[in-house]
Amino acid sequence: MSRALLQHLELLRNLGVKELYRGSSSQADLLQSLSQRYSSCQNCPLGATRKNFVYGEGNPNARAMLIGEAPGAEEDRTGHPFVGEAGKLLDKMLAAIDLSRQDIYICNILKCRPPNNRDPESAEREACLPYLLEQIDIIQPQLILMLGRVAAQTLLESRLTLEKLRQSVHSFQGIPSYVTYHPAALLRNPHWKRPAWSDLQKFRDHYLSL
Ligand code: URA
C-alpha cells in the first residue's frame, strides 16, 4: 500500500470514518453514498451555518476535474456546485472549449458555504481537504483545473499570486494541473477574460491530448 494511501486512510479514520465502500459499487454509487454519508458533517464550524453540504457532481469517470473555492448562496440553497451566476459563466467557458458538465467532475475545496462568502479559513480547508482527496482518489482524473486563488494556493501549498500560479503547469498528486481565474472574479473584472481564454486553450489542448 502506498504511503499516500496510508496517510489518506489515517485522515479518514481521524474524521470518524469506520468503513470504506469499495469493490463492487461503481464510482457513481460510491460518490453518491459518500455524499450522503458526509452530508451531516460537523468537522468545522461551517456545519452549523450551512443549509446544504455541497459535495460535488459531474461525470464520475471524468478525465478532468475542476476545483473551485466554496459554495456560494445559490449552491448552499440547492446543494449543487456552481449553479449561481459564476456557474453560468463557467458553463459558457466550458462550452467555449467544447466541454460540458457531463464531461467533467466539479467540486470545491470547501463543501460548506462560509458566511457572507468570506475566504475559507485554514482550519476549514484542513478539515475539508480529506473529502476532496478522496474524490480525486475515486475519480482518478488525468487533468485538474484549479479555479481561482484559493483553490490553487490551497492545493499547491503556495502563497504565490494567481497571476504567477497560472503561468505554469503544476503537478498535484502527480496529476497535471492548470490554474485559471475563478469565474466570479471574471464577472467582477471582465478584462481578465482574455488571459483566462488563453489558460482555457492550454487546458483544452492538454485535454485533447489525453
Ligand atoms: N464559487 C465556487 O468556488 N464554487 C461554487 O460552487 C460556486 C461559486
Image: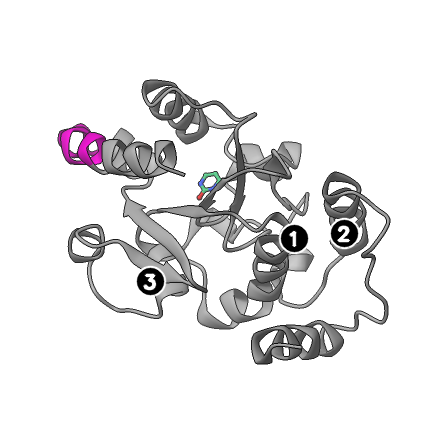
Q: Which residue is drawn at 34% across and 25% down?
A: 93
Q: Mark 2 points at which residue?
A: 34
The residue shown at (65%, 32%) is 78
The question of residue 138 being in magenta is answered with: no
Could you classify mark 3 by the number of other residues whose Cα lies within 10 Å: few (under 14), some (14-19), or many (20 or more)? some
- Rounded to the nearest angstrom, the CA distance separating label 3 from label 1 is 23 Å
State the CA–CA distance, disc 2 to disc 3.
26 Å
Secondary structure beneath label 1: helix
Q: What residue type is labelled 3?
A: Gln
Could you tell me residue 127's position as x and y percent?
Answer: 59, 69
Q: Do the residues labelled 2 and 3 touch (CB within 8 Å)?
A: no
| Camera-nearest residue between 162 and 145 | 145
Quarter occupied by residue 91: top left
Instruction: Report how far apart the C-alphas of labels 1 and 2 lie in the structure.
Output: 11 Å
Who comes first in sequence, dot 2 or dot 3? 2
**Residue drawn where x is 20% and y is 54% of the image:** 168
- The answer to which of marks 1 and 2 sits earlier in the sequence is 2
Mark 2: secondary structure: helix
Sequence-earlier tag: 3 or 1:
1
- Left/right placement of residue 149 relative to residue 167 reads right
Q: Where 161 falls versus 11 (above or below)?
A: above
Q: Which mark is residue 138?
A: 1
Residue 8: x %, y % from top left: 63, 73
Region of the chain picked out in magenta, as a range: 188-198
Q: How crowded is mark 1: few (under 14 residues within 10 Å), some or many (20 or more)?
A: some
Q: Which mark is residue 153?
A: 3
Q: Are marks 1 and 2 in contact (CB under 8 Å)?
A: yes
Q: Where is residue 125 in the image (x, y as percent from the top left)?
A: 50, 65
